[in-house]
Image: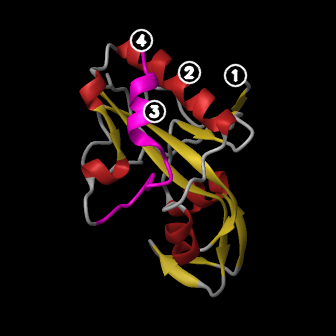
């Protein structure tokens, strides 16, 4: 597993996680018109997932690129801002959907198979390591949509959830 360290200071202090949350987001986000968020203007452009999270004041512990490389944003014992309501006590993995997407095209894309074999392999290996290290119960490996039903749809139907869970040791 190739790990690229791109640490962010966005998050909280120390935690002892008892949950693992699997998310997905666009590898690159396309903004067609400027908009305001948290008092900042997001300009027209194309942003990497790492840049996007930084601009929005969010973070995840790991981003998994389409080639299986891992971008590590924070240590697993540090709190990230990835899952409203359970940031404290959870590790967040963002699996990146290859390509450039805006929100509506992204939501359509994740309804179909989108995860690369390299991403599945890396996500399974990384998840197994996290589960073992923190002694996380398999019932506490959740999708973002499980903890925010109606508000979040990721990682979507295109992520073979039952298959993924069956591969965890």
**Mark 2 vs mark 3, CA separation in Å:** 11 Å
The local crowd at label 3, few if under 14, some if 14 to 19, many if 20 or more residues have their Cα within 10 Å, is: few
Determine which residue is flagged by label 4: 133
Asked which secondary structure carries label 4, the reply is helix
Specify which label sits upstream in the sequence, 2 or 3.
Answer: 2
Asked if 111 appears above or below 14 in the picture, the reply is: below
List x then y, in percent, for residue 10. 50, 46
**Which of the two labelled residues, at mark 4 and mark 3, occupies the earlier sequence position?**
4
The residue mark sitting in front, 2 or 3, is 3
Position of 21 relative to 103 (above/below): above
Mark nearest the camera among 4 and 3 is 3
Q: Is there a contact, CB below 8 Å, between mark 1 and mark 2?
A: yes
From where the camera sits, is residue 67 visible? yes
Label 4 crowd (10 A; few <14 / some 14-19 / many >=20):
few
Where does the image place residue 31, in percent across and percent down from the top left?
65, 78
SS for callout 1: loop
Q: Are marks 4 and 3 in contact (CB under 8 Å)?
A: no
Report the side of 166 relative to 69 (left or right): left
Q: Which residue corresponds to mark 3?
A: 164
Mark 1 or 2, nearer chain start: 1
Magenta residue span: 151-169
Q: Which residue is denoted by mark 2 in the rendering?
A: 125
Residue 1 has which mark? Answer: 1
Mark 2–mark 3 CB contact (< 8 Å) = no
Please say whether residue 18 is visible from this viewpoint.
no
Mark 3 or mark 1, earlier in chain? 1
Residue 90 part of the magenta segment: no
How many numbered marks, from 0 up? 4
């Amino acid at each position: 597993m190739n790990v690229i360290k791109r640490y962010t200071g966005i998050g909280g202090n120390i935690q002892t996680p008892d949950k693992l949350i699997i998310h997905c987001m666009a590898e690159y986000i396309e903004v067609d018109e400027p908009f305001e968020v948290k008092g900042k203007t997001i300009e027209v452009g194309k942003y990497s997932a790492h840049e996007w999270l930084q601009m929005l004041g969010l973070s995840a512990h790991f981003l998994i690129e389409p080639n299986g490389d891992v971008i590590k944003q924070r240590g697993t014992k540090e709190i990230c801002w990835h899952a409203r309501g359970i940031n404290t006590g959870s590790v967040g993995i963002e699996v990146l959907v290859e390509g450039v997407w805006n929100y509506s095209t992204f939501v359509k894309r994740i309804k179909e198979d989108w995860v690369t074999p390299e991403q599945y392999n890396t996500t399974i290996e990384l998840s197994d390591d996290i589960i073992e290290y923190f002694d996380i119960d398999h019932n506490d490996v959740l999708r973002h949509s499980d903890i925010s039903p109606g508000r979040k749809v990721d990682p979507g139907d295109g992520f073979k959830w039952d298959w993924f869970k069956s591969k965890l040791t």
